[in-house]
Image (spheres, rainbow, N blue to C red):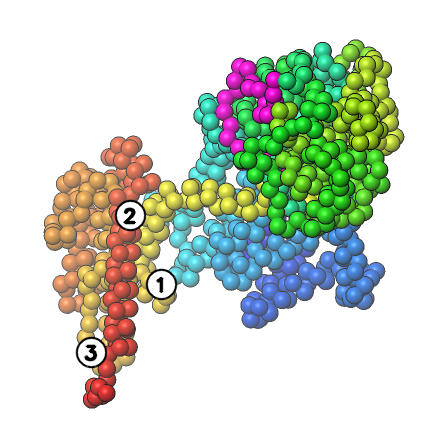
């Protein structure tokens, strides 16, 4: 098999191995077989067109055309001409399938059924596009290293959507495929210099061969994969999830500092909210009012015009008693309640669901406290899975008058929580002013907004809604007047900010369903989002704009006779109502109602961020590149040394065999001749003499390259080279300091004699086996060296300093050439008179 054919096969295998990361997303996994077949056809077309050969762009175009024909045959043959040639109808069908696939992704939980043709088209089409990119970069343009970027993109998409349980396994598979691709490219490049080096002979008593670069590459690959799997486990990281774990938690150290990253927890609800059977997430018992007991997970205060997400915040250790919430004054009525919460064994959540505002928490494990949002987040993989914890919280009971008379908030707080991006459509601001026209306080404005959304604005709570994305999402929602709690809370918070009211969005659970044993069951479909508005003297205050969801706060109705505020009908049970031991149909949907789909889901797929859960792709790519740099940079001396040794010893082997290509001869001779040791020159009178003289120069370069490798090998093991010595004395010094055995000493002297031959003999002759002599020296030095010296000789070789010297020499040469060219440009030609 030719080198390029082997490289194409490795590109096909690498793409297929990276595609395995998508296996947990769809069931059954038989699509991978179809993908393998289609990738094979795509790769085969590329191999055939390169063999013709066609120009590189034509090769890529041919592969793209065949890919389109295959997708047409599989998904749109009824709409295509002759079942394979796509036309306008076929492309329209593709668009419909892609739209259907997007809808199915939002509708189905992981793993999604393969029967969805839209999801299947996304899978196969995406894999084929990645496969084309990898084949183009690695095979057509013979640059395997950049081919890792599309493979990384494929793995990142899969990792961002999966539950993270087996991400390490798929990373290992994908990374192994990429390393295999790099190794195949390196083998192909080496083969262009001559024969590919073999390993040690299998026949006893035979001459030892060259150390195989393939074997070295395997060892480096295993080391790199091991570090890539171990190092991330030790580094601080935090991804997001509302109903599933984020992995490793936040920060580092003992919990006294760190930051919490800005991730969007809403998108992680996508799968859980579309289950057919409601599952219990939490069970709680409290001495407070269960009808008004919201469990808050996290607050979203960073608004970019299309969605809300939590800001990057400083986190600290959890104090024994939590401070009084920001803005809560002493005149507001409050009562402290206790709530014991038990999480399901499958519910692995990084944030701790708690009533707001908490005043104290007793929970086992490693948790950290975010003071601004008054939330707890797990540290280094800590989650709620199977946890039972006790939360003390304040039941704050402000009056409408206290909220209406609230003074202006502090300027810093108001500036931060009333920020709106310039991309926000003007209709949001104009609608907010129109709805709240005639209000005399921010409180009246807030109540009118809540009333408009929940009662008299004509809005409907619908789970079958098509809401736009990007900056126009809120505008489309205000026009269509259909949406989920996310859309209601997002819109009200944005409109409140436009009126100068500090606002944010809280995410958590609405009051659950009371049980006969006086506990409360909180299920997946109780997940909820609501706006929180800030009033000085009261603090962050909950409002409920979503129709028929949650509980309308009692303080949003005025008890003052003659108040201009209308009586606001409750969207569910009043907060002041007595607790019933029977399930309430108004507090939240009962289990039977949920099974009958009478209530709708608690939270939709986040239409404003269609990319899926977890960090954005550019964050994943950035951190991945940073991790690769952190992994590769310390290994650069070792990799450079391995590369230089391979080139030098290959030159020694080919100098004896005489089977080196012109390209290889020039590169290998440069290692010896560029240092300025020797150049045999003269004027040849015949072509035969010129060739003979050129061969002599090449032989000299090869021998000097091997000599340099011998001295550098000794240097790596502690014998610093002395350039003032002759080759014979330098060899004797190496033998003496290295305490070499006779066989190794003879090898060193043999290389030194070859150097003297090319330097001083009138007609130097090629000395065979010099590369083996250097390997024999390296084996002898390694056998006598300590473990520390052996490790340093491999990972941090002393002779790698030559890389910096070479770079400095090249830079100086570049500056000299540049200066000469500039001088030639500005120099006046001879005989030209100045004017």
The residue that mark 2 highlights is: 800
| Badge 2 or badge 3: first in the primary sequence | 3
Q: CA distance from mark 1 to mark 2?
A: 22 Å
Provide residue 284's location: percent of width, then percent of height: 71, 16
Inspect this view and state whether residue 606 appears: no
Q: Residues within 10 Å of mark 2 (few under 14, many from 20)?
A: many
Residue range of the region highlighted in magenta in the rendering: 308-330
Of residue 204 and residue 21, the one placed in the foreground of this image is 21
Compared to 273, does 336 lie above or below?
above
Decide which of 695, 746 is in the foreground and name it. Answer: 695
Query: In the rendered image, which residue does mark 1 sit on?
Result: 664
- Which of 594/466 is in front? 466
Query: With 201 as the anchor, is 556 left or right in this view?
Result: right
**Spatial CA span between label 1 and label 3:** 24 Å
Q: Is residue 188 above or below residue 50?
A: above
Give the structural element (helix, strand or loop) at label 2: helix
Task: Please identify, in this view, whether the residue under mark 2 or under mark 3 is nearer the observer.
Answer: 2
Disc 3 element: loop
**Residue at left 54%, top 63%?**
140
Tag 2 or tag 1, which sits nearer the N-term?
1
Q: Where, by quadrant of the figure, is residue 403 drawn?
A: top right
Q: Residue 683: which numbered mark, if any?
A: 3
SS majority, magenta:
loop
As drawn, the label of residue 454 is: none
């Amino acid at each position: 098999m030719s080198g390029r054919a082997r490289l194409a096969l490795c590109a096909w295998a690498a793409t297929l191995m990276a595609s395995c990361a998508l296996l947990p997303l769809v069931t059954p996994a038989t699509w991978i077989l179809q993908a393998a077949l289609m990738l094979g056809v795509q790769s085969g077309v590329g191999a055939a067109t390169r063999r013709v050969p066609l120009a590189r762009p034509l090769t890529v175009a041919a592969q793209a055309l065949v890919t389109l024909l295959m997708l047409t045959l599989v998904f749109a043959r009824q709409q295509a001409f002759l079942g394979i040639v796509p036309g306008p109808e076929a492309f329209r069908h593709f668009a419909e399938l892609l739209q259907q696939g997007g809808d199915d992704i939002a509708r189905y939980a992981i793993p999604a059924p393969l029967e969805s043709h839209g999801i299947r088209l996304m899978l196969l089409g995406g894999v084929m596009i990645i496969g084309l990119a990898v084949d183009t970069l690695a095979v057509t343009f013979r640059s395997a290293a950049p081919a890792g970027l599309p493979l990384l993109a494929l793995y990142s998409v899969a990792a961002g959507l999966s539950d993270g349980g087996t991400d390490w396994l798929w990373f290992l598979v994908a990374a192994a495929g990429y390393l295999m691709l790099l190794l195949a490219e390196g083998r192909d490049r080496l083969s262009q210099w001559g024969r590919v080096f073999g390993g040690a002979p299998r026949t006893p008593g035979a001459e030892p061969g060259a150390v195989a670069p393939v074997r070295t590459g395997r060892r480096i690959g295993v080391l790199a994969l091991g570090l890539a799997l171990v190092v991330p486990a030790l580094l601080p990281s935090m991804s997001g999830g509302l109903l599933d774990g984020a992995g490793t938690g936040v920060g580092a150290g003992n919990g006294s500092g760190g930051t919490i990253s800005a991730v969007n927890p809403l998108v992680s609800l996508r799968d859980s909210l579309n289950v057919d059977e409601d599952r219990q997430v939490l069970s709680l018992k409290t001495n407070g009012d269960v009808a008004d007991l919201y469990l808050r997970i996290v607050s979203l205060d960073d608004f970019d015009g299309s969605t809300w997400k939590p800001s990057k915040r400083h986190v600290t250790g959890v104090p024994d008693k939590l401070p009084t919430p920001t803005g809560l004054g002493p005149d507001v009525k409050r009562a402290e309640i206790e709530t014991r919460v038990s999480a399901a064994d499958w519910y692995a959540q990084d944030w701790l669901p708690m009533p707001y505002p908490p005043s104290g928490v007793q929970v086992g494990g490693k948790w950290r406290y975010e003071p601004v949002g008054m939330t707890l987040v797990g540290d280094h993989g800590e989650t709620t899975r199977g946890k039972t914890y006790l939360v003390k919280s304040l039941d704050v009971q402000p009056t409408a008058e206290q909220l209406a008379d609230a003074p202006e908030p502090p300027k810093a707080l108001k500036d931060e929580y009333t920020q709106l991006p310039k991309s926000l459509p003007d209709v949001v601001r104009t609608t907010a002013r129109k709805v709240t026209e005639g209000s005399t306080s921010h409180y009246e404005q807030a109540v009118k907004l809540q009333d408009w959304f929940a009662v008299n604005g004509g809005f409907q709570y619908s789970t079958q809604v098509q809401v736009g994305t990007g900056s126009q999402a809120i505008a489309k929602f205000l026009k269509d007047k259909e949406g989920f709690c996310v859309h209601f809370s997002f819109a009200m918070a944005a409109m409140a900010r436009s009126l100068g009211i500090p606002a944010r969005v809280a995410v958590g659970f609405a009051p659950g369903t009371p049980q006969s044993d006086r506990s409360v069951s909180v299920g997946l479909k109780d997940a909820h989002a609501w706006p929180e508005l800030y009033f000085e003297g009261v603090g962050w205050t909950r409002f409920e704009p979503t129709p028929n969801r949650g509980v309308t706060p009692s303080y949003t109705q005025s008890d003052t006779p003659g108040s201009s505020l209308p009586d606001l009908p409750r969207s569910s049970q009043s907060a002041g109502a007595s607790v019933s031991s029977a399930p309430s149909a108004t507090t939240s949907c009962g289990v039977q109602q949920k099974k009958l789909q009478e209530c709708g889901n608690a939270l939709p797929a986040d239409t404003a961020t269609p990319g899926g859960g977890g960090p954005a792709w550019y964050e994943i790519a950035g951190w991945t590149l940073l991790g690769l740099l952190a992994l590769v940079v310390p290994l650069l001396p070792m990799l450079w040394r391995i590369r230089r040794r391979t080139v030098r010893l290959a030159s020694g082997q080919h100098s004896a065999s005489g089977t080196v290509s012109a390209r290889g001869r020039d590169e290998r001779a440069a290692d010896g001749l560029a240092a300025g040791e020797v150049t045999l020159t003269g004027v040849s009178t015949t072509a035969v003499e010129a060739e003979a003289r050129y061969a002599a120069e090449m032989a000299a370069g090869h021998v000097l390259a091997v000599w340099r490798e011998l001295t550098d090998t000794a240097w790596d093991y502690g014998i610093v080279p002395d350039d003032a010595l002759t080759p014979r004395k330098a060899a004797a010094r190496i033998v003496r300091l290295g305490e070499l055995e006779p066989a190794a000493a003879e090898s060193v002297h043999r290389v030194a004699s070859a150097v003297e031959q090319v330097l001083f003999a009138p007609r130097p002759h090629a000395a065979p086996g010099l590369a083996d002599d250097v390997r024999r020296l390296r084996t002898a030095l390694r056998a006598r060296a300590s473990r520390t010296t052996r490790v340093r000789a491999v990972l941090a070789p002393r002779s790698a300093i030559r890389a910096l010297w070479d770079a400095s020499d090249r830079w100086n040469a570049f500056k000299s050439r540049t200066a000469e060219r500039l001088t030639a440009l500005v120099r006046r030609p001879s005989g030209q008179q100045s004017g």
